[in-house]
Amino acid sequence: MNPYFCQVDNLKFNVGAFHKAIIADNPVQRMPNGPYWAEVLKHHRGEPMQAEFAELYKKINPNFPAFGIPHMEDSLETFGRHNSTDEFARILQYDISKDLLDKFYKFLPECISQQNIRFTYQRVVSGTFHHIHRDHDRPCTLFYLLSEPVAKTCWHTMKPESLEEFTKNNTLGMTRSIGPKYCNLEYTTVIQKNQWYMFNNSEYHSVHCLPEFDHIERTSVHLDFLDLTYQELAQILMDNGFSLTDV
Ligand SMILES: [Fe+2]
């Protein structure tokens, strides 16, 4: 099995049919639980992302300017098209009401709905890439794309020499986001619309606009598994008659 991403063949719940209800529900933009992301959201006024990051890093963690910003700059240099700071993708996440959530969960097989899960409605509204990172609050998800595919998703591993360096400097804990020079590209895919996938959010991943598009506009639904690893989720799905296909 692909350790990063695979298709769940026979999970047929069509979220597209549910999409109008999600919009009509006026989903609430999620305030992230970490102080860093809460600040990002609070100060988010449409200024270039790089400036926001620089200020916020300084404010929240004095160690970040030295460490985080070079990673952002490496990413911009490697992944940006025009080296403009507004190329960093803006990702917004939303919660839906409990009423709607209950309706939604009724369609899910028990082996999924009985797990510790969270529903996330996500929109990427601008930018051409999201830098290499690991999600801080969900080890794995079931991912369903609602909009046309305009981006590729890549997974990376840290180079052994970088791992050694970070371990030696005692900065490994700060590597939730990381510059491309520290990583090897392992796997790339273009996620297709109206299909459930298993997504490993614990491994380094990044998102990049396809060359034929100007920027990323993407809407997706995620079932976030808060207590399961990607491998544990795969086992549960297979034990319950779902087949997983590498794509
Ligand atoms: Fe992510």
Image (spheres, rainbow, N blue to C red):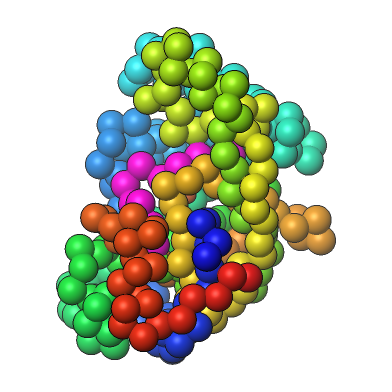
Which residue is located at x 79 percent, y 37 percent?
Answer: 82
Which quadrant holds residue 184? top right
Instruction: Judge whether 162 appears above or below 215 on screen.
Output: above
Point out the stretch of residues depicted in magenta.
Answer: 131-141
Can residue 56 be seen here? The reply is no
The residue at 52%/56% (across/down) is: 4
Q: Is residue 55 above or below residue 242?
A: above
- State yes or no: residue 132 in magenta: yes
Residue nearest the observer in this picture, 12 or 99: 12
Residue 42 is situated, as x and y percent measured from the top left of the image, at 35, 37
Tell me where residue 190 appears, x and y as whole percent: 66, 65
Q: Tell me if I can see residue 141 in this picture.
A: yes
Please give the name of the residue rendered at 55% of the width and 75% of the height, measured from the top-left corner. 245
Residue 133 drawn above or below residue 244? above
| Quarter of the rendering containing residue 182 | top right
- For the C terminus, the image quarter is bottom right
Q: Residue at x 42, y 47 (%)?
A: 202
Give yes or no for residue 16 being in the magenta stretch: no
Residue 179 in the image: state x and y as whole percent.
60, 29
- Frontmost residue, 182 versus 81: 182
